[in-house]
Amino acid sequence: MSIDTTWLRCPNCLLSLDAVEPGVLGCDNGHRFDVSKHDTVTLLPPKAPRTIGDDREMLASRAALLDSGAFAPIASAVADAVQARGGAADDATTRVADLGCGTGYYSAHLARSIPGLEFLLGDRSPDAVRMSRRALAGGTGVVLDIWRPLPIRDAAADVVLNVFAPRNPPEFARILRPHGRVIVVVPTTAHLRELRATGAMLDVPAEKAELVGSRFADAGFSASSRATVEYDLEADEAMQAALVGMGPSAHHSTDRPADDAAPRRLTVSIDVLVFAAGSRAG
């Protein structure tokens, strides 16, 4: 079993979770959680909404797009942000909680770029967590709800990684160690604007980075750095379909241009935001 229980707490009573028998995690109040055959565990709070996160079709689109290298500059920028913040306190192993892990692409890139990291791979989608575990076999895979109290112990992480995913700043503050950082990737208004202009994708709110920053400030974080990554991407019809199908736009019916009018050169534009844990963290 590759579940590292030092990350985990019970979603029901918030006590620490430990292995109580082969393939079973439990707390002192008697709550029990089976580890799946995929070596993942589902830790959803009571009465959690019955959403399932990204479905297999969306994840397949995302995997196809990411495997092509289309977002490799974003992964490199994330790795640079992790390296820039330095190592864990007292030379301990740096622990990364990838929340909204998706296919595990960004954590797998981090693991290749920065040896010795430890990972928690969390997502609402069981398919995503399984896919992430295949990408990064040593990670602890957890099905969780980012919007609710996280089944993660206090001060368990040095880095929270949040790439194109929901955010819960108060909970991120709680699970970070005092020296910790949150690394957030959000699109700018220029991101894939050629597809957005056709109605194929949802719009990005103006000043999104500023809005995100204000919510983290409310949770006690301070803005540490901001870097914009922008480049042109040559996208054939299949790649364009993957870009639309891999995210929230896949759930919305939109008008799309005829194939012969489809743009081929697209703008990729994102902000990498780094927030430092403040007095409320740790």
Image (cartoon, helix red, strand yellow):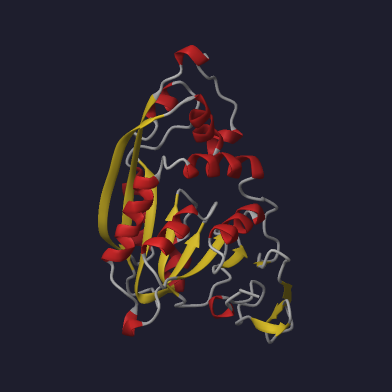
Give above or below for 163 relative to 115. above
Residue 36 quadrant: bottom right
Q: Describe residue 185's horizontal placement relative to residue 19 as left or right.
A: left
x, y percent for residue 153: 52, 77
Q: Describe residue 276's horizontal placement relative to residue 56 as left or right.
A: left
Give above or below for 123 relative to 89. above
Q: Describe residue 5's horizontal placement relative to residue 278 as left or right.
A: right
Where's the C terminus, which quadrant? bottom left
Query: What residue is rendered at 42% in x and 57% in y?
Result: 109
Where's the N terminus, which quadrant? bottom right
Residue 93 quadrant: bottom left
Looking at the image, can residue 247 be seen?
Answer: no
Closer to the camera in the image, 115 or 95: 115
Q: Describe residue 23's horizontal placement relative to residue 219 as left or right.
A: right
x, y percent for residue 58: 60, 41
Closer to the camera in the image, 44 or 36: 36
Query: What residue is rendered at 57% in x and 65% in y?
Result: 137
Residue 266 quadrant: top left
